[in-house]
Image (tube, rainbow, N blue to C red):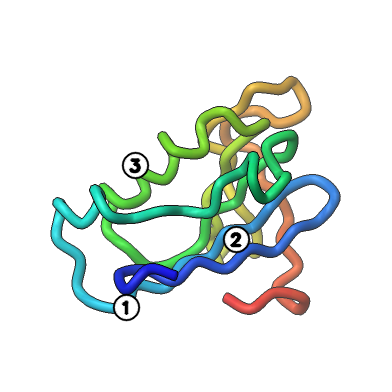
């Protein structure tokens, strides 16, 4: 577990929701020491990834790049009760699609 960011993983049939909590104020060179959950080791590389958490835009850029090999990447937006697809490698999910997120079953 990192002393910088705490990650939690919640899987469902279509995607893996990765929620993060920052433990202290981040500085850009912290990116060198952040280890997000590995999609191959955690067996979700064949699914999409939904990212959730409060952090700087450059952290999101890092995470989007890290999860690039997955089926799709979406960013959770609580105002929409869903996640917006920002990258896709499948015809099932297009850029701008909204992936419904059941917030009753997840801890954000």
Closest to the camera, between mark 1 and mark 2, is: 1
Where is residue 35 drawn, in percent x and y? 40, 53
Q: Earlier in the sequence, mark 3 or mark 2?
A: 3
Where is residue 24 drawn, in percent x and y? 24, 77
The residue nearer to you, when weighing 80 against 90, is: 90
Q: Quadrant of the C terminus?
A: bottom right
> Dot 3: few (<14), some (14–19), or many (≥20) neighbours within 10 Å?
few
* Distance between the alpha carbons at the discs numbered 1 and 2: 26 Å
Residue 99 versus residue 48 in the image, above or below: below
Question: At 85% from the left edge and 50% from the top edge, which residue is drawn?
Answer: 13
Q: Label 3: which residue?
A: 61
Left or right position of 60 against 91: left
Residue that protrudes farthest toward the right in the picture = 13
Q: Earlier in the sequence, mark 1 or mark 2?
A: 1
Q: Secondary structure at mark 1?
A: loop
Marks 1/3 in contact by CB < 8 Å: the verdict is no
Q: Earlier in the sequence, mark 1 or mark 3?
A: 1
Question: At 65% from the left edge and 38% from the top edge, which residue is drawn?
Answer: 97
Q: Label 1: which residue?
A: 23
The residue nearer to you, when weighing 96 against 62, is: 62
The residue nearer to you, when weighing 57 against 42, is: 42
Question: At 14% from the left edge and 60% from the top edge, which residue is drawn?
Answer: 27
* Distance between the alpha carbons at the discs numbered 1 and 3: 19 Å
Tally the numbered discs: 3
Q: Quadrant of the N terminus?
A: bottom left
Where is residue 11 drawn, in percent x and y? 75, 58
Residue 47 versus residue 13 in the image, above or below: above
* Distance between the alpha carbons at the discs numbered 3 and 2: 21 Å
Q: Label 2: which residue?
A: 80
> Dot 2: few (<14), some (14–19), or many (≥20) neighbours within 10 Å?
few
């Amino acid at each position: 577990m990192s002393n910088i960011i705490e990650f939690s993983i919640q899987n469902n049939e279509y995607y893996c929701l990765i929620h993060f909590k920052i433990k202290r104020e981040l500085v850009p060179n912290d990116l060198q020491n952040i280890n997000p959950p590995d999609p191959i080791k955690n067996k979700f590389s064949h699914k999409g990834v939904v990212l959730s958490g409060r952090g700087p835009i450059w952290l999101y850029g890092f995470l989007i790049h890290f999860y690039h090999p997955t089926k799709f990447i979406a960013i959770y937006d609580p105002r929409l009760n869903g996640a917006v697809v920002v990258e896709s490698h499948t015809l099932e999910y297009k850029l701008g699609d909204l992936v419904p997120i059941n917030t009753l079953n997840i801890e954000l």
